[in-house]
Image (cartoon, rainbow, N blue to C red):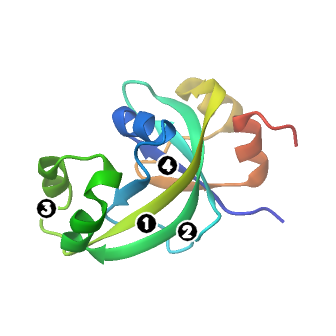
Amino acid sequence: MDSLNILISIKPEFATKILDGNKTVELRKRFSNKALAGIRMMIYSSSPEKEVVGYVNITAVSTLSVKDIWQKYKDASCVSKLYFDKYYHSRDTGVVVHLSNPKKIKEKIKLLELKKIYNIHPPQSYRYLSDRVFNNIIGYKT
């Protein structure tokens, strides 16, 4: 039986910071209620890169007040206060996805290849992937 995996779209500057180990949390307005500790999250670096660049493990998912998110995770999120306030404008709560063990993949998968070979269209936010597809994309033999 397949485990749950997630493909997530992230802006290139944040994808790089995650894979370099500097950004240890991903902030979202909402996130999967199925996303539990131990799930693998594949990172699709959105425009202009438009490619899968790596993956991380999710260690926890927390829903908190926007005020608490900024107080607790401003450094780990690698975002400015201006960006944070614009992103969470008029929201009371948000989601913090805790990340660990970032891995860059050797051969990045471009958008065209993702669509052609895997029939995957990158999500606006996130989508689920089977173990087989996840492992094939990151280069594991299944």
Type of the residue with mark 3 = His
Q: Position of residue 28 (x, y in %)?
A: 35, 60
Question: Label 2's element?
Answer: loop
Q: Are marks 1 and 2 in contact (CB under 8 Å)?
A: yes
Q: Which residue is mark 1?
A: 31
Real-space Cα distance between discs 3 and 1? 17 Å
How many numbered marks does the figure carry? 4
Type of the residue with mark 4 = Ile
Q: Position of residue 54 (x, y in %)?
A: 58, 37
Q: Which residue is mark 4?
A: 8
- State whether residue 72 is above or below residue 84: below
Q: Which residue is mark 3?
A: 89
Residue 45 in the figure: left or right of residue 94: right
Q: Nearer the viewer, residue 35 or 57?
A: 57
The label shown at residue 82 is none
How many other residues sit within 10 Å of disc 3, few (<14), some (14-19) or many (≥20)?
A: few
- State whether residue 40 is above or below residue 23: below
Question: Label 1's element?
Answer: loop
Which mark sits nearer the N-terminus, 4 or 2? 4
Which mark sits nearer the N-terminus, 4 or 1? 4
Residue 93 in the figure: left or right of residue 96: left
Q: Residue at x 22, y 63 (%)?
A: 70
Residue 21 in the figure: left or right of residue 40: left
Which mark sits nearer the N-terminus, 4 or 3? 4
Real-space Cα distance between discs 4 and 1? 10 Å
Classify the position of the C terminus by image quarter.
top right
Q: Position of residue 60 (x, y in %)?
A: 52, 69
Classify the position of the N terminus by image quarter.
bottom right
Real-space Cα distance between discs 4 and 3? 22 Å
Q: Which residue is mark 2?
A: 35
Q: Are marks 4 and 1 in contact (CB under 8 Å)?
A: no
